[in-house]
């Protein structure tokens, strides 16, 4: 199936007409490392919301328990008062950038129109949100009683929360409907962070690198990167340990030991490195 592509040379930005990320290759593992707290928060929220969706789609009551715990963690992580403001400002900045490429013969008008439509809809949904993030959950005393017990190891057993035990034994459709109603008010944040992370991930170009004797270092002077992405072949038994700041990036690949202390890789390792920045 064909697809239109927007190519913005100055930003190295690649957008599909469906406004979707490139699907990672099935034979590589991608590691992402954010350079600031804002991107770190968005990545954590994305991970939690993906877990909520995955386990919510199941019929298993234990999976629905995990989905609810992920929802509680989402509210905790998103407790920053300026999260919505950050997303609105970033989405508006990206809208202005894309608007500047209208009537450009090198740009797919259909893909540009689709991207702008999604951005503008997301911005409107974010602006329509009122109150504190997740306040509808905090106002639900039953949910908060579960949350307080779930913070205690083993605290959500049936003898601690009999009403929750009853809920877990209801039919899957009822539980799923409840879970969907609790997460739906958070959807504008989910849509907004998905757009920002999609743009961030597509802003860089992967470059082939080699970690000599398992180590790689490079200066970061003048870099505006907000995140790096590292892709390693699945067949390679190597896990990157990453440290970075505005001065330097250091990557040390380790052997993925699960029984003993991890040991440094001592051979050359090829990998892909992408610097991402909006």
Image (cartoon, rainbow, N blue to C red):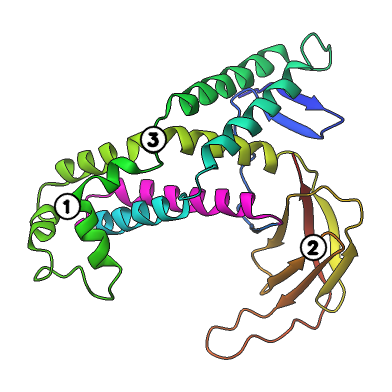
Of 277 and 7, the residue lying toward us:
277
Say what secondary structure mark 2 lies in.
Answer: loop
Image position, residue 236 (x, y; %):
69, 70
Residue 76 found in image quarter? bottom left
Q: In the rendered image, which residue does mark 2 sit on?
A: 245
Image position, residue 18 (x, y; %):
59, 25
Q: Is residue 179 left or right of residue 167?
A: right
Q: Residue at coordinates 82% horizontally, 47% vertically from top-left?
A: 224
Q: Residues within 10 Å of mark 1 (few under 14, many from 20)?
A: few
Q: Looking at the image, is mark 3 or mark 2 earlier in the sequence?
A: 3
Locate the N terminus by quadrant.
Answer: top right
Image position of 262 with respect to 172: above or below: below
Q: Residues within 10 Å of mark 3 (few under 14, many from 20)?
A: few
Residue 87 found in image quarter? top right
Q: Is residue 90 visible?
A: yes
Q: Is residue 21 visible?
A: no
Q: In the rendered image, which residue does mark 1 sit on?
A: 142
Magenta-drawn segment: 35-62
Q: Residue at coordinates 22% horizontally, 52% vertically from top-left?
A: 143
Q: Is residue 86 left or right of residue 155?
A: right
Disc 1 from disc 2: Cα separation: 44 Å
Say what secondary structure mark 3 lies in.
Answer: loop
Query: Which residue is situated farthest in the top direction here?
Result: 103
Magenta stretch containing residue 48, yes or no?
Answer: yes
Q: Nearer the viewer, mark 3 or mark 2?
A: 3
Q: In the rendered image, which residue does mark 3 sit on?
A: 131
């Amino acid at each position: 199936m064909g697809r239109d592509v927007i190519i913005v040379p100055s930003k190295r930005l690649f957008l599909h007409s469906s406004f979707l990320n490139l699907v990672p290759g099935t034979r590589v593992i991608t590691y992402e490392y954010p350079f600031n707290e804002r991107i770190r928060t968005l990545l954590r929220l994305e991970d939690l919301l993906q877990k909520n969706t995955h386990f919510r789609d199941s019929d298993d009551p234990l999976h629905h328990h995990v989905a609810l715990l992920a929802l509680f963690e989402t509210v905790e992580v998103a407790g920053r008062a300026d999260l919505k403001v950050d997303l609105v400002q970033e989405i508006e900045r990206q809208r202005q950038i894309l608007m500047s490429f209208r009537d450009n013969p090198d740009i797919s008008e259909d893909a540009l129109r689709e991207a702008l439509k999604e951005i503008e809809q997301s911005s409107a949904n974010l602006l329509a949100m009122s109150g504190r993030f997740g306040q509808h959950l905090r106002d639900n005393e039953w949910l908060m009683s579960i949350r307080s017990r779930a913070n205690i190891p083993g605290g959500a057993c049936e003898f601690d929360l009999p009403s929750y035990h009853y809920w877990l034994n209801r039919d899957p459709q009822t539980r799923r409907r409840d879970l969907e109603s609790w997460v739906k008010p958070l959807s504008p944040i989910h849509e907004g962070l998905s757009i920002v992370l999609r743009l961030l991930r597509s802003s860089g170009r992967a470059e082939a690198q080699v970690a000599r004797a398992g180590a790689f270092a490079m200066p970061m002077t003048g870099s505006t990167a907000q995140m790096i992405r590292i892709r390693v072949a699945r067949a390679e038994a190597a896990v990157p340990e990453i440290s970075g700041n505005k001065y330097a990036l250091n990557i040390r690949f380790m052997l993925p030991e699960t029984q003993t202390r991890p040991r440094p890789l001592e051979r050359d390792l090829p990998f892909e490195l992408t610097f991402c920045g909006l």
